[in-house]
Amino acid sequence: MMKKLVIDDLFAQTLEGKEILKGINLTIKQPEMHVVMGPNGGGKSTLAMVLMGHPGYKITRGKISLNGKDITNLSPDKRARLGLFLGFQYPVEVPGVNFSNFLRMAVNEERKKGDKLSPIAFRNLLLDKAGQLSVSEDIVKRMLNEGFSGGEKKKAEILQLALLKPTFAVLDEPDSGLDVDALKYIAKTINSLDFPLGLLLITHYQRILHYLKPDFVHILLNGKIVKSGKAVLAKQIENSGYEHLKYEKP
Ligand code: ADP
Ligand code: MG
């Protein structure tokens, strides 16, 4: 069966009843790369949160399915077990969690008995991946995200993605707060993943799109996708901005 993440007529609001997503339709097939762009406040992060099952939002209409299974009401950890990965716009710190142990447990959870990585085998794998990402050995040994700069958090997150090999990933502004070198590393890692990934990449800026070639680009404005197209749409937006889309019928 073709692996796909399907968002069907999705409406969502905050717990206080503020409607944010107003009918989102989007299908991502593995291994497509979709980019969702839009102005601040349009609902991009809310879409990422709702896809991951964040308890701060409620879905009032529509559904989300992953490889044919309805996941609309599943808990975040069940979604993760089904192969959905979420990278946050502002990754949170997890005090007291050792980054390396955390990752090894997460990676081993996906592996069959007898195929589990020993601490040494995992360390070699991790340092190899970290080297590709230019994440220093020191960082790997430090606590998960604790005391990391914004750029280091983003790199650590992409490293998690590369190791966990999810089937689908939602990355919310993996480019925000990064200098050009860090941005290139993030893009390079995404481009060189050694497994098929369906990717929904959310971004406010087109900068990262100078290094990535999405299959589709969607513009999210005021809780709705108002325009979809190929990668060239991002170029058009770069030239014309979002403003004129407000007056264009979808
Ligand atoms: P984007 O990521 O595109 O900038 P967001 O999804 O963060 O947009 O926010 C969309 C709108 O919803 C904004 O007006 C924001 O203030 C509002 N919003 C998001 N989350 C909440 C929340 N938990 N409570 C109240 N308003 C929220
Ligand atoms: Mg956001």
Image: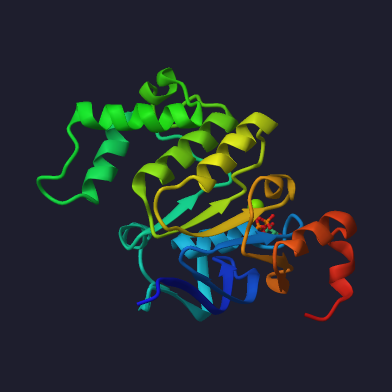
- Would you identify the image quadrant in which residue 146 lies? top left
**Quadrant including the N terminus:** bottom left
205 lies left or right of 249: left
Residue 222 versus residue 237 in the image, above or below: below
- Would you identify the image quadrant in which residue 70 lies? bottom left
Residue 58 versus residue 147 in the image, above or below: below
Q: Residue at x 35, y 57 (%)?
A: 80
148 lies left or right of 17: left
Q: Residue at x 49, y 75 (%)?
A: 6
Q: Position of residue 85 (x, y in %)?
A: 43, 54
Q: Position of residue 17 (x, y in %)?
A: 60, 70
**Quadrant including the C terminus:** bottom right
Q: Position of residue 198 (x, y in %)?
A: 48, 62
Q: Residue at x 63, y 59 (%)?
A: 214
Q: Residue placed farthest to the left in the image?
A: 114
**Closer to the camera, 69 or 111?**
111
Any part of residue 99 in sight? no
**Closer to the camera, 210 or 207?**
210
